[in-house]
Image (cartoon, rainbow, N blue to C red):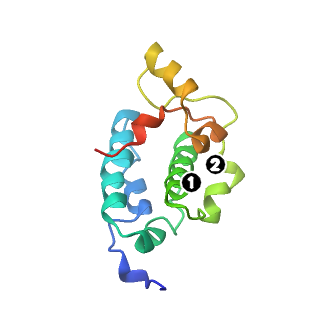
Amino acid sequence: MALAEDDVPVGRRLKDFASQLCGCDDEMRLRIVLHEFGLVWEDTPLVARLRLVADEPGPIDRRWDAFLAAYVEHRYMHDGIVAPEWVFDEARYLDEFWFPGPDLDFFRVEAIVHPPAAFEARRAFLPARELLVV
């Protein structure tokens, strides 16, 4: 079943949430992506999820561009579908490690020991449990 452009309302696409990330600190950015967009993802039927992230979000900064790609790839993998091509753009991979969560030793250890594959590949280390939407 093909989806029309208007099957996902404006404001619910990842690119809409990504525009909110500019000017925020990392804690707020995590909240916007993991909680607010995460709830939209969970509440959207599988076939419509393809439209949520079909359009590449505009650039934010190198770290968050990599984070969004990792997040989308991770969500798609768990849904058993192939992520959009923009996710695999080489500009969305980091050259050095980054921990987008709290600057706490135990958080970093958990992020290194239990990172989701898409995040590890991009060197954006976040514990897998942080991606659960509750």
Residue 109 appears left or right of 129: right
Vertical position of residue 27 compared to residue 110: above or below:
below
Q: Mark 1, residues whose alpha carbon is within 10 Å: few (<14), some, or many (≥20)?
A: many
Residue 92 appears left or right of 48: right
Residue 29 in which image quadrant: top left
Of the numbered discs 1 and 2, the one sitting upstream in the chain is 1
Total labels: the figure holds: 2
Q: Position of residue 122 (x, y in %)?
A: 64, 40
Residue 23 in which image quadrant: top left
Q: Position of residue 14 (x, y in %)?
A: 43, 60
Which numbered tag is attached to residue 73? 1
Residue 12 in which image quadrant: bottom left
Q: Position of residue 86 (x, y in %)?
A: 62, 61
The residue tagged with tag 1: helix, strand or loop?
helix
Residue occupied by mark 2: 92
**Structural distance between the alpha carbons of marks 1 and 2:** 11 Å
Camera-nearest label, 1 or 2: 1
Q: Residue at x 42, y 42 (%)?
A: 131
- Can residue 62 be spotted in the picture? no
Q: Amino acid at mark 2?
A: Arg
Q: Position of residue 52 (x, y in %)?
A: 43, 67
Q: Amino acid at mark 1?
A: Glu
Vertical position of residue 16 compared to residue 73: above or below:
below
Q: Residue furthest top?
A: 105
Quadrant in which the C terminus appears: top left
